[in-house]
């Protein structure tokens, strides 16, 4: 996946005035996915980014700070993809599929072929558990707002009896998260997109039928 220029310097959101931090983050992301977090050193990152080691430390305090800056970048990418999905033309299913793909598709593109994904997930949890939790909460809230906007526009009705919109979204998101472990999906980007579309169809159909409300 082609990655756009990073606009933030570090987890404190300082402005980048040099292309070097961007090169450092891109190099680090490649190394982390290829070799894992523990086996990747600042020396490795500097060599891959073609900068001096001191340049890495000029922009990032340590390896953990580099990792967190990557997370910050990915958060921004998810938000940009969500905005694009919300504004796209097409049916409610098309747009909800795009919203699901904004999160799960990007993660799939970046990490699905990495043999070190369990370690990376552990590192994300160790360094940024609360931050990831906040991102997930923000993402689910965004999906819920989207469904409510469809309901307000008369495109769908409310959720089935016994469920709120947030609960319905939570179920869909958990199913999307589990899709990456499906043998029919693993390593196949198109298969993941089909699965996400199936989940979008189910969610929209449930609210169109308004079962036993």
Image (cartoon, rainbow, N blue to C red):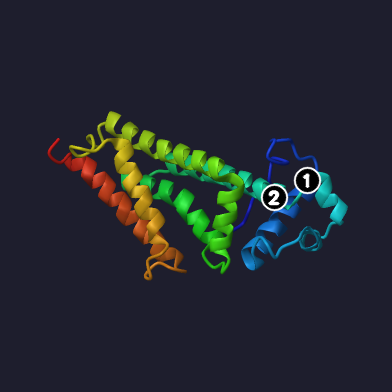
Label ID, residue 64: 2
Q: Is residue 115 above or below residue 155?
A: below
Q: In terms of secondary structure, where does tag 1 sit? A: loop
Q: Residue at x 50, y 59 (%)?
A: 108
Residue 204 coordinates in the image, percent (x, y): 27, 45
Q: Quadrant of residue 159?
A: top left
Residue 189 spot, x, y in % from top left = 45, 64
The x and y percentages for residue 31 are: 68, 63
**CB contact under 8 Å: marks 2 and 1:** yes
Q: Residue furthest left?
A: 212
Residue sitting at 28 percent across and 51 percent down?
201
**Which quadrant holds the C terminus?**
top left
Mark 2 and mark 1: Cα distance apart in space: 8 Å
Furthest-front residue in this view: 126
Residue 35: name its quadrant.
Answer: bottom right
- Where does label 1 land, which residue? 61
Residue 91 is at least partly visible in this image: no
């Amino acid at each position: 996946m082609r990655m756009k220029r990073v606009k933030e310097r570090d987890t404190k959101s300082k402005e980048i005035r040099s292309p070097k931090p961007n090169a450092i983050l891109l190099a680090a992301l490649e190394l982390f996915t290829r070799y894992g977090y523990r086996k990747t050193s600042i020396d490795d990152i500097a060599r891959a980014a073609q900068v001096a080691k001191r340049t890495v430390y000029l922009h990032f305090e340590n390896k953990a700070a580099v990792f967190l800056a990557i997370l910050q970048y990915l958060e921004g990418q998810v938000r940009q993809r969500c905005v694009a999905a919300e504004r796209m033309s097409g049916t409610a299913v098309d747009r909800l599929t795009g919203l699901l793909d904004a999160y799960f598709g990007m993660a799939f593109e970046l990490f699905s072929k990495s043999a070190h994904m369990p370690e990376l997930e552990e590192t994300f949890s160790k360094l940024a558990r609360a931050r990831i939790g906040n991102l997930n909460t923000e993402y689910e809230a965004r999906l819920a707002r989207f469904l409510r906007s469809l309901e307000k526009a008369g495109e769908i009705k409310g959720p089935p009896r016994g469920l709120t919109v947030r609960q319905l979204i939570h179920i869909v998101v958990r199913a999307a998260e589990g899709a990456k472990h499906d043998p029919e999906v693993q390593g196949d980007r198109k298969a993941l997109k089909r699965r996400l579309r199936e989940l979008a169809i189910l969610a929209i159909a449930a609210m169109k039928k308004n079962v036993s409300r």
